[in-house]
Image (spheres, rainbow, N blue to C red):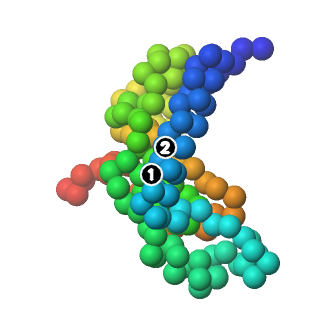
Amino acid sequence: HQSLFPTDTLLALSQKSKTIERQVCQRLADEGKIWNITTTPQSPSSSITTNSKNLQLEQQNAVKYHEVASRCLGRLDIRHGSSPTPITTSSSIIANQFLMPLIHSLLGGSDATLVYAGLILSFPHSADQPWHQDGTALFGDDE
């Protein structure tokens, strides 16, 4: 049984991800930002997206820094600690002999370009995330 990625690479990525999560969440806490939803008997998880108190918290605490952005309460899109290439430059990720042919096939050619890599954190009971664009435009305005 062969793994898609080497175990040591996955363990290193996992450890780096945990470190980045701690750093970002601590900095947001230091800034007084609320990024996570906690449920209470008065606010069960089933009413998270319709609870006006949580919607107000979301509006007041939305963050959009270069290193991290909140899409909604409980979800963080993190670039801190990453680079324009994946959070590792390991060829086992970027040039994976099994993954890259699949990506090229799905995207219609071998000119697929990695634009951005980072972390997405979705905490328990997070609100529904609105639609948003994650990358650059596929076609120019004149195409």
Q: Which amino acid does label 2 sit on?
A: Gln
How dense is the environment of label 2, judged by Cα within 10 Å: few (below 14), some, or many (20 and up)?
Answer: some
Residue 128 or residue 21, whichever sits in front: 21
> Which element carries disc 2, helix, strand or loop?
helix
Q: What residue appears at the point 33 percent right and 51 percent down from the top-left corner?
A: 66
- Amino acid under disc 1: Arg
Query: In the rendering, at what x and y percent does residue 85 appear?
Result: 38, 30
Query: Is 36 situated left or right of 31 in this image?
Result: right
Residue 23 is labelled as 2
Residue depicted at 40% across the width and 27% down the height: 110
Task: Give the vertical position of 46 relative to 12 (above or below).
Answer: below
Where 1 sits versus 59, above or below? above
- Give the residue number, with chain letter if any, for mark 1: 27
Q: How far from the left and from the top, in percent, is residue 59? A: 46, 76
Asked if the residue under mark 1 is in contact with the one under mark 2, i.e. CB atoms within 8 Å, the reply is yes
Answer with left or right where residue 94 lies relative to residue 142: right
Q: Residues within 10 Å of mark 1 (few under 14, many from 20)?
A: few
32, above or below 11, in the image: below
Q: How many angstroms separate mark 2 from mark 1 (CA)? A: 6 Å
Going by the image, does 51 lie left or right of 1?
Answer: left
- SS state under label 1: helix
Specify whether 13 is left or right of 137.
right
